[in-house]
Image (cartoon, grey):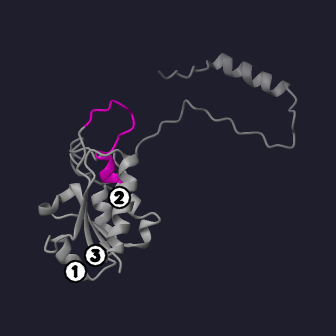
């Protein structure tokens, strides 16, 4: 709610001028401000011949709400990783043309049990001169966790690529990609080992 400015009558204006003349300024070196009469100010819009295009409210608004997930998914992260191995072999591997020489299934394991099992499996496969191994994690269960912080689906699916990038496995792993559908799809990973 805005307040209206009270208009001074002619009698009030004369009284105010008399008071103003009878006072002594505190800082005479400062120039006196000019008195502005607000009653005569009547702003009028400038006339120009600019015509605005017709529009309706909300016509350019987005119809879908963007997701609130700011971090890329594990699949997107692995796809955007640079190829460290031979490109032709990498293409054959992602198309499911290469068959894994060994596999480990981590279904049903807790993180405490899966991490040492994965480490033991990868190091023993490298010691046996195997190049391509398959790590099956599963896609994870759908859970309704009513919390303010979203939880990613599939704990092992999200942790295995992280474990493979840490020591001591980082020294023997050359490339990690999501498996082809015939080898488990997004619930498994191809791990290509160094020589």
Tag 1 near tag 3, CB within 8 Å: no
Say few, some or many: other residues with alpha carbon within 10 Å of mark 1 (under 14 / 14 to 19 / 20 or more).
few
On residue 131, the disc is: 3
Find disc 1 in the rendering and name its residue: 89
Residue at the image position 31 percent from the left and 64 percent from the top: 78
Left or right of 63 in this view: 6: right
Find disc 2 in the rendering and name its residue: 118
Name the quadrant of the C terminus: bottom left
Residue at the image position 39 percent from the left and 61 percent from the top: 119
How far separated are the C-alphas under marks 1 and 3?
11 Å
Left or right of 6 in this view: 147: left
On residue 160, the disc is: none
Locate residue 128, reporting x and y percent: 32, 74
How far separated are the C-alphas under marks 1 and 2?
24 Å
Q: Earlier in the sequence, mark 3 or mark 2?
A: 2
Q: Earlier in the sequence, mark 1 or mark 2?
A: 1
Locate residue 9, reporting x and y percent: 61, 18
When the figure is inspected, residue 89 is found, relative to residue 123, above or below; the finding is below
Magenta-highlighted residues: 143-159
Q: Earlier in the sequence, mark 1 or mark 3?
A: 1
Q: Nearer the viewer, mark 1 or mark 3?
A: 3
Tag 1 near tag 2, CB within 8 Å: no
């Amino acid at each position: 709610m805005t307040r209206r400015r009270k208009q001074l009558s002619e009698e009030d204006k004369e009284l105010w001028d008399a008071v103003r003349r009878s006072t002594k300024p505190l800082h005479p070196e400062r120039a006196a401000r000019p008195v502005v009469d607000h009653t005569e100010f009547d702003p009028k819009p400038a006339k120009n011949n600019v015509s605005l295009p017709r529009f309706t409210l909300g016509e350019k608004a987005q119809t879908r709400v963007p997701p609130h997930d700011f971090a890329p998914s594990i699949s997107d992260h692995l796809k955007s990783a640079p190829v460290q191995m031979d490109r032709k072999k990498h293409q054959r591997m992602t198309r499911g043309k290469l068959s894994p020489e060994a596999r480990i299934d981590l279904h049903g394991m807790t993180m405490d049990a899966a991490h040492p099992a994965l480490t033991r499996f990868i190091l023993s496969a490298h010691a046996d001169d195997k190049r391509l191994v398959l790590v099956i994690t599963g896609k994870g269960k759908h859970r309704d966790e009513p919390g303010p912080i979203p939880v990613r689906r599939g704990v092992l699916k999200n942790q295995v690529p992280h474990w493979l990038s840490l020591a001591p496995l980082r020294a023997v792993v050359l490339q990690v990609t999501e498996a082809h559908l015939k080898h488990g799809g997004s619930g498994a990973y191809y791990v290509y080992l160094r020589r």
